[in-house]
Amino acid sequence: MIFPYPPSLRILLLRFFAFFVFLLHCRGEPRSRGYLKLPLVHRDPLLSPRKIIHWDFQRLSALRAPVVSGASTGSGQYLVDLRLGTPPQRLQLVADTGSDLVWVRCSACRDCSRRPPGTAFRARHSRTFAPFHCYSPECGLAPAPNPPAPCNRTVLHTPCRYHYAYADASFTSGFFSRDAVTLNASSGGEVEVRRLDFGCGFGVAGPSLSGARGVLGLGRGPISFASQVGKPIGNKFSYCLMDYTLSPPPTSYLLIGNGDAHRSSQRRLRFTPLLTNPLSPTFYYIGIEAASVDGVRLRIDPAVWALDGAGNGGTVVDSGTTLTFLPEAAYRRILSAFRRRVRLPRVAPPDPNLEFCVNVSSSSSSPAATAEGREGREGRMGLPRLSFRLMGGAAFSPPPRNYFVDAAEGVQCLALLPVSSDSGFSVIGNLMQQGFLFEFDREESKVGFSRTGCVFSS
């Protein structure tokens, strides 16, 4: 999570100028109707609930701290292919709506034959790579080291240094830089965006960054990928997170730009307004007003869901967190409703953080081959349907597979966890979002979702 410095007049003028430069550099793609797309894949479909919970708790502890990153790179993430540099180098980065900075692991090697392609960005091998000067306006938007690195405005090659820290003492540091990025376009061709500002991480260390290639920040701040690339072509982005239980796993896309990509499903999108938290401006907050189980509204005080004036509470839609975290009071009501309705045999949870697990082996003899098959079995098993009423009247009603996880052979557990509303916020994680098309309309400050319109092919 980034809290950028207030923009100066020079930065505002630079952004105004960059808008027109972008239009010139995005060759061949109409501004009003075009969109760009990046393949979106799940990292590890066989992740255990214990590891998911471990990474999620690490991530949430980072999200609550105002000076550290919210972009965990644990194995429960969704990745995008980014082709960076000239000629393009392909890297897989974590798609993260909970952070702003785009950063990649960088290498300064001249002869990179010993390093497999895709493990790091080879800065020396890109003709268009350039670090920012430490006194440039762009450097003021980068997360700065603490204490700040010395900057001599008279020295031509004094680079802009950044430092991005994590709650578990992991970090990435290096030069805040720019380079070209090549993306697929709605026309079927390619578009070269000649300038993407990103962190070139020559120092990457710590447990949560082991093996990480980088993070594609999609947050609401000015240096996120969605802000830099998406603003001139509609200022919106959308994705459909595939169901990781499907075999073979389908391919979907992160779409940047105008929603014409899903024209057939636009009429079916249900929208809820995006809220803003001045203390956490990066995040996509939505307003939950009520929750129900099997159509029965639960007695939960609306204040439980509220984002207060001090910046506490509220609900964030986050692609970088796997499970869903709810306020303690709401979680207890939902858990109680599930316990009353589910008739399957109870089993001991494999992890102490999971409180409700059932034996489903007698209800199904074989794994699901398709999403429809699994959803049908969920109905036969009698797993309740959870639904949230959102601000603006939209109802978000995911199927049980979005909040029950396979914890062991024939065992499923409720994948909801409580969070104190006094110290944190609720999170709609990527498991809860699976199978839905989500469109983040930053221009109109709203988010839409639909069970139809997912893009699983090119």
Image: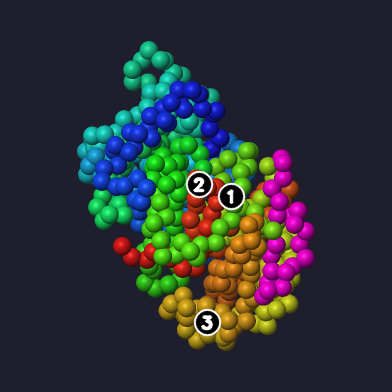
Q: Please tell me the numbered disc located at residue 274.
A: 1
Question: Badges 1 and 2: C-beta atoms under 8 Å apart?
Answer: yes
Q: Does the magenta segment cover residue 206?
A: no
Foreground pick, 79 / 4: 4
Quadrant where the C terminus sits is bottom left
* Residues at marks 2 and 3, CA–CA distance in whole angstroms: 36 Å
Q: Residue at x 49, y 41 (%)?
A: 100
| Label 1 or label 2, whichever comes before in sequence order | 1
- Where is mark 3, residue-wise? 376
Do labels 2 and 3 touch, CB within 8 Å?
Answer: no
Q: Position of residue 101 (x, y in %)?
A: 46, 40
Point out residue 348 in the picture as x, y percentages from the top left corner.
Answer: 65, 73
Evaluate whether residue 259 shows in this view. yes
Identify the residue position indicated by label 2 in the image: 442
Q: Which residues are magenta?
A: 290-310
x, y percent for residue 319 = 51, 54
Whether residue 430 can be seen here: no
Instruction: Kindly indicate the quadrant of the structure image that contains residue 299.
Output: bottom right
Looking at the rendered structure, the kind of residue marked 1 is Leu
Q: In the current view of this chain or complex, which residue is farthest to the top?
A: 154
In the rendered image, the quadrant that contains the N terminus is top right
Q: Left or right: 48 with respect to 261?
A: right
Which color mode does the image show? rainbow
Foreground label between 2 and 3: 2
For marks 2 and 3 on the same chain, the one whose residue lies earlier in the sequence: 3
Mark 1 or mark 3: which is in front? 1
Please report the residue visible at 24 percent of the width from the left and 39 percent of the height from the top: 86
Element type at mark 3: helix
User: In the image, what residue type sits under mark 2?
Assistant: Arg
